[in-house]
Image (cartoon, helix red, strand yellow):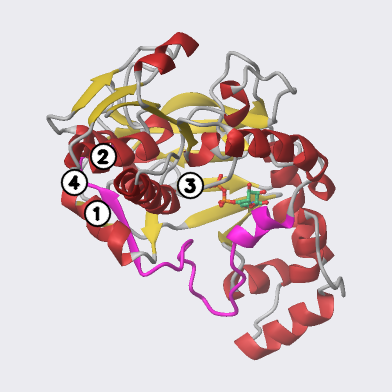
Amino acid sequence: MDILLVGAGLSGAVIARELAEAGHRCTVIDGRPHVAGNCHTERDPATGVMVHVYGPHIFHTADAGVWDYVNRHMTFRPYRHQVRTTVGDRVYSMPINLLTINQFFGTAMRPDEAAAFIKAKAEPIADPQSFEEQALAFVGREIYEAFFKGYTEKQWGTSPQNLPASILKRLPLRFSYDDNYFAHPFQGMPERGYTEMVESILDHPGIDVHVSTVFQPEMASRYGHVFWSGPLDGWFGYDLGRLGYRTLDFERFEGQGDWQGCAVMNYGDADMPFTRITEHKHFAPWEEHGDSVLYREFSRACGAEDIPYYPIRLVEEKALLGDYVSRADGEEGVTFVGRLGTYRYLDMDVTIREALDTAGAFLAAQKAGTAM
Ligand code: UDP
């Protein structure tokens, strides 16, 4: 079958590869001039540092199959993601761990003392719905206001009362000095960047890739099936209204040596206009660079011409999302995939797992003669 994949990010690339290996002819298009979507990496011309062009992407997973898959396409170097956060005129450890708690409260508590202390601060909210309720039930008001409230307002452009609890559930709370941002058993950085990894996934005689190629609705009729990893509402021409996304602006600047001492420094205060500063050279600690390139990251509402990054999933947006999802379920000949296609905040490993499963289900349906 001739298959069109719209979007050359992880979803489109992985599905195309699986289908091409099963004998289908795959065309992958992407409106941007490169593959790899928002995990695209390229060398900064001035410093030679490998830059995460659309913001920091750290590969971490508990899925051994996915870890195996990415390692077949790129050598992964050991990498341990560590983040710090600046609040007021102090720097604290992240994610919230025993050091953060002791730094913040000026204490020297042991793990069980800190756990009891935080338990007493946590507010008794039975079934937290919003980000704010989740945070108050998790760590109490003081930590919430210092580390989460301002950052989250800047990142999402709305009060944490309007955001789903699931966003906060991404972060751990540890009563130990473990400051590894991720707890997954597999974690690493692609030695030559994500773009080269995605190029390797797409490197198959059954796959044609066309970058700088914007999807036009009339293209779909030329293919037996379409996999859509563009915005879910975009497929329908936004006719029910737009789902909210956040987009990011990056302000690039150069530094010398080790400018900030870590890969990512968050800024918790609401009156600091950016959310974080990323120093890209720390993503490749095996490389040597005297010069440093850094990105200040600003978040704002995504306009029609902007690149969508984060699906906002406001509590009040659920009904509109439900309408689009039920229409998508009823569409024949098209499958909606990935972060934008399903309007979910997906990590890279989950995106790859879902792409592998979607391709598997498609191939099984083909074999059984049932349409998808
Ligand atoms: N967050 C926060 N303060 C921080 C770090 C994270 O309030 O210092 C909140 C914020 O709402 C963010 C969410 O936790 O969007 C998830 O954080 P994560 O680091 O997973 O965000 P990502 O790197 O995916 O942007």
Amino acid type for the residue under numbered disc 3: Val
Would residue 169 be counted in the magenta stretch? yes
The C terminus - image quarter: top left
Q: Is mark 1 within 8 Å of ligand 1?
A: no
To which residue does mark 4 refer?
A: 73
Q: Position of residue 7 (x, y in %)?
A: 40, 27
Q: Which residues are magenta?
A: 165-194
Q: Residue furthest left?
A: 205
To which residue does mark 3 refer?
A: 264
Q: Position of residue 267 (x, y in %)?
A: 63, 45
Q: CA distance from mark 2 to mark 4?
A: 17 Å
Q: CA distance from mark 4 to mark 1?
A: 7 Å
Q: CA distance from mark 1 to mark 3?
A: 27 Å
To which residue does mark 1 refer?
A: 69
**Secondary structure state at the residue bearing disc 2:** helix
Mark toward the viewer: 2 or 4: 2
Q: Position of residue 48 (x, y in %)?
A: 24, 29
Q: Are marks 4 and 1 in contact (CB under 8 Å)?
A: yes
Q: Is mark 3 within 8 Å of ligand 1?
A: yes
Amino acid type for the residue under numbered disc 4: His
Q: CA distance from mark 2 to mark 3?
A: 37 Å
Q: CA distance from mark 4 to mark 3?
A: 26 Å
